[in-house]
Image (spheres, rainbow, N blue to C red):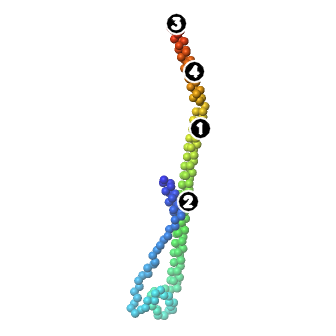
Amino acid sequence: MKKLTSFIVLLLMLFVTTIARAEAPKLPELDIPVGEKNVGAAVSPMKKGQVAPFTGVLLSPMAVASMIAEMKMQEERTNLEVKRTTAELTATCDFEKNKLTIQAETDAKIAAAKLEASMKQVTMLEDTVSKSSDPFTMGAIGFGLGIAATVLIGYVSAQAAAR
């Protein structure tokens, strides 16, 4: 039963996909100064000395490039982690599958050997029974020996009485 349960779990691990659901990212709440309009997610290229059109964070082109590169690298790291985990689980599943297959084959060979031994014993017993004489012949021999013994005893008794 334990083997069957392990096999079913193995199959489920191989064929049931998992789905990860995440909440939408929550942006930090920003305090917009009084009198300033909320421009949402806006990009406004600026030059040195220019007045900013809204309150926010100024990023240099290098900082933006660095953030974009970091996001792409994180995506690649995630993909690599997924591939690694998938490879590990596949290897584990293959190992368990091979182990169960070997165990099943061994159990089948043991069962076949036991069956063969039982069949040999049955054949041997059948041969022993068929080689012995049939009951009618044995009965006739017993009956004949019984008559001979009775006649012999009667003869010996008659001889003893005559003396």
Q: How many marks?
A: 4
- Which mark is first along the chain, 4 or 3? 4
Give the label on residue 144, or none: 4
Q: CA distance from mark 3 to mark 4?
A: 27 Å
- Which mark is first along the chain, 4 or 2? 2
Residue 64's x, y, as percent? 51, 83
- Which mark is first along the chain, 4 or 1? 1
Q: Secondary structure at mark 3?
A: helix
Give the label on residue 100, or none: none
- Which mark is first along the chain, 2 or 1? 2
Residue 12's x, y, as percent? 51, 62
Identified by mark 1, the residue type is: Thr
Closer to us: 44 or 23: 23
Query: Which residue is under mark 2?
Result: 94
Give the label on residue 123, or none: 1
The residue drawn where x is 53% and y is 9% is 159
Give the label on residue 162, or none: 3
Identified by mark 2, the residue type is: Asp
Q: CA distance from mark 1 to mark 3?
A: 58 Å
Left or right position of 31 against 141:
left
Residue 26 falls in image quadrant: bottom left
Q: Is residue 146 above or below residue 75?
A: above
* Front disc: 1 or 4: 4
* Front disc: 1 or 2: 1
